[in-house]
Amino acid sequence: MLRGAVGRQRQVSSQLCHLLVFSVGGRRLAVKTEEIGGISAWVGSIPIPSCTPFISSVIRRDQAVFPVFDLAGMLKVRVKGEQRLCLMAKQADGAIAICIDEEMPALHSLDAAKIQAYRGNDIDTVGCFTDEFEDVPIISATRLGAA
Amino acid sequence: MSLRGHRIGSAAQVPIERFLIVGIDTQQFALSAELVQGLLTMEESGSVSTLMVQGQEYPSLDLGDRLGLAQAGDGPETRMVLLAQAGIRACIRVDQVHGLVEVERTRLLPLPRQFRSEERNWYVGLILYGEGVAVGLHSRWLLSGAMEGHSGLLNQEQRLPLRLSDTSDRMRKGIAC
């Protein structure tokens, strides 16, 4: 029984975590792929007067409307590029759109054990990982705007 | 009086609601047609804080200010929209009147739940209009800042017709009395 428990622990520690690494205002961030609904071209948002922090516009996709989370505003940066992208994040309340830099996001897999605590407090994360350049915060897309 | 306009939806049996689509700043808003008593050009309304129309007072409500929108100067499309419900009257200045639409109730999209603050009391939902979205304003909230009228419940016969004094083609297509 003890052996079994140890085995499970090893299995968990070597579990791969699949991330999408993207940038907003040049700042690199990551999100778990399971929290992503898709990526497409940014089509422009429609402002909706609102008191909810960082949620004050929507985008229309055919017959559907999705709220937009202003991640750049929260990070106090400006989204870069002319061909911006739209990252759709899954939330319990429905999908939410995020405008991100035109730089194409990249898939990244790492051992879940390599996820460390994120020291910054400017964004709600589930941790961060270190690549050859820097610490990359892993945001919690499901909790964006929930505060 | 019957109001004609664009219809959004298809099924004949579904209850419909009529909205007047107006523009303030760069945004489109939908006012319940039940509220709308008439439209006045700026020449007709003048620049007074309370309009007097057919013996009824319509205090001016600054909707742009309540919603934190930019205030544009008067233009050829600027209108005063007269509103009344349950004896409460008000008029709002809009930059443009886009037209009247009939919307099947099922096509009135709820405000996404991620909008979780005070604005949930402001809006009845979202309406797909043209290539964009018009925000349906809650009638009670809209008139909440207005003074109580003197004559109690509004007599529906006192309602002014939606007039076509405008030169806008959009208006002609959108609204008829």
Image (cartoon, grey):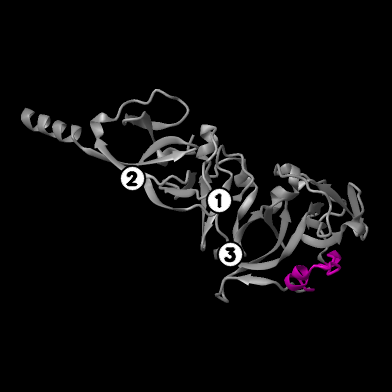
Q: Residues within 10 Å of mark 1 (few under 14, many from 20)?
A: many
Q: Which segment is the magenta one?
A: B157-177
Q: Pinpoint residue A110: horizontal percent, then vertical percent.
A: 25, 36
Q: In the picture provided, is A143 more to the left or to the right than B163?
A: left
Give me the C-alpha separation between circle 3 and circle 1: 20 Å
Q: Secondary structure at mark 3?
A: helix
What residue did someone put label 2 on? A33
2 or 1: tag closer to the N-terminus: 2
Q: Does mark 1 fall on the same chain as mark 2?
A: yes
Quick check: is B161 in the magenta stretch? yes
Quick check: is A69 in the magenta stretch? no
**Nearest to the observer: residue A33 or residue B123:** A33
Q: Secondary structure at mark 1?
A: strand
The chain containing the residue under callout 1 comes to A
- Residue B130 sits above or below residue B49 on the image: below
On the image, which quarter does residue B136 sit in?
bottom right
Q: What kind of residue is marked 3?
A: Arg
Which residue is located at x 58 percent, y 64 percent? B105
Q: What kind of residue is marked 1?
A: Val
Give me the C-alpha separation between circle 2 and circle 1: 23 Å
Q: Pinpoint residue A43: horizontal percent, then vertical percent.
A: 53, 54
What residue did someone put label 1 on? A58
**Nearest to the observer: residue A83 or residue A70:** A83
The chain containing the residue under callout 3 comes to B
Residue B105's label in the rendered image is 3
Q: Pinpoint residue B97: horizontal percent, then vertical percent.
A: 76, 61
Q: What kind of residue is marked 2?
A: Thr
> What is the quadrant of the C terminus of chain B in the image?
bottom right
